Amino acid sequence: MTEQRTMTNAAWAQLILLALIWGGSFFSIAIALREVSVLQSVLHRVGWAALALWVIALAQGHSVPRSLKIWIGFMGMGLLNNIIPFTLMAWGQTEIETGLVSILNASTALFGVVIAAALLRDEQLTRAKAVGTALGFAGVVTVIGWSALKSFDIRSAAQLAVIGGTVSYAFAGVWARYMLQGLSPVVAAAGMLLASTLIMLPVVLVYEGLPSLKLNFNTWAAIGYYALIATAGAYLLYYRILAVAGSSNLMLVTLLIPPVAIALGATFLGETLPPSALPGFALIALGLLVIDGRLGRALFKRSPSR
């Protein structure tokens, strides 16, 4: 019998922090896309993040891995976790509304649970995970607004692109478990992003030429946020959570990102939360508690014996 991975209090805290960081990424990407292309936005994201993480890795005394298997792992992870989803979702964000992108992005958790259960022996699809993930996804849809789903069109290439990005994210968690297990988080993240940069640079040069660095301050600020904070810093957390909680639990961060983004907008931009926000948050919280399992165990222990 395989051991099921559970979420510790520390893992939950890291997951919430990751959601807070990634919650602002949609806004910063939208700002950058006003001046740079989709491909260049992805190159900026992985390139500057890779540089920052390798500075950190070398300063901490880590060396560059020499194993061919590890570099194959970096290349696969770069494609699955960076290039494919970053490109598809950035392009999708230029074609469809942010609310729908957020809803579709949250389906990463659903794909993550199913794919991890199919490919990883220690991440079986339990009833609690299935029910909890469904509740969490319903909560995200409720927060954003059920009316947003009315614009969903299966024939829309942009919406299919976002869904493709979520599936890629889900496979990335499993790939990392197989190929990069045992690496320190900083080396794993730095290697993945360097591999992504090595793939993206020739693509941009061939299709768009040498990217211009003469950008507006707002564009550089947006790039700085999503490259250094929402990518370099976030992936350090990503690999730490992956190591202790597993890939399907890690994918739950996509359920937290949309409500976090709405809450930040209400707090710092004076935006009004929709009436559906509170019941949506309640559904998300319930779903996470069901997946975590501790609420059920606590209720079971307190129930009188028969």
Image (tube, rainbow, N blue to C red):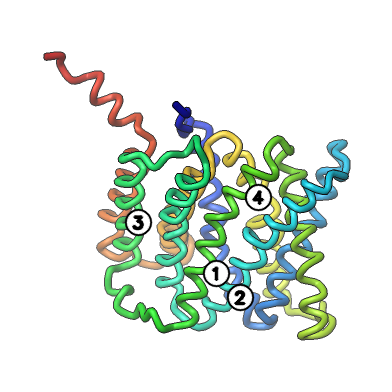
Q: Earlier in the sequence, mark 2 or mark 4?
A: 2
Cα separation, mark 2 vs mark 1, equals 6 Å
Residue position marked by numbered label 4 in the rendering: 235
Cα separation, mark 1 vs mark 4, equals 19 Å
Residue position marked by numbered label 3 in the rendering: 137
> Pointer 2: residues within 10 angstroms few (<14), some, or many (20+)?
some
The quadrant of the image that shows the N terminus is: top left
Task: Kindly indicate whether the residue at mark 2 contacts the one at mark 3 (C-beta within 8 angstroms).
Answer: no
Task: Kindly indicate whether the residue at mark 1 contacts the one at mark 2 (C-beta within 8 angstroms).
Answer: yes
Q: Of 168 and 185, which appears nearest the observer?
A: 168
Residue position marked by numbered label 1 in the rendering: 27
Q: Earlier in the sequence, mark 4 or mark 3?
A: 3
Q: Which quarter of the figure has residue 90?
A: bottom right
Q: SS class of the residue under badge 1?
A: helix
> Closer to the observer: label 3 or label 1?
3
Vertical order, 256 against 45 (above or below): above
The circle drawn on residue 8 is none
What is the three-letter code of the residue carrying label 4?
Answer: Tyr
Q: Earlier in the sequence, mark 1 or mark 4?
A: 1
What is the three-letter code of the residue carrying label 2?
Answer: Ile
> Pointer 1: residues within 10 angstroms few (<14), some, or many (20+)?
some
For image coordinates 58% across by 49% down, the residue present is: 173
Q: Earlier in the sequence, mark 3 or mark 1?
A: 1
Total tally of numbered discs in the picture: 4
Residue position marked by numbered label 2 in the rendering: 31
Q: SS class of the residue under badge 4?
A: helix
Q: SS class of the residue under badge 2?
A: helix
Residue 109 placement (x, y as % from top left) = 44, 53
For image coordinates 47% across by 47% down, the residue present is: 118
Cα separation, mark 3 vs mark 1, equals 22 Å
Q: Which quarter of the figure has residue 224?
A: bottom right
The answer to whether residue 267 shows anywhere in this view is: no
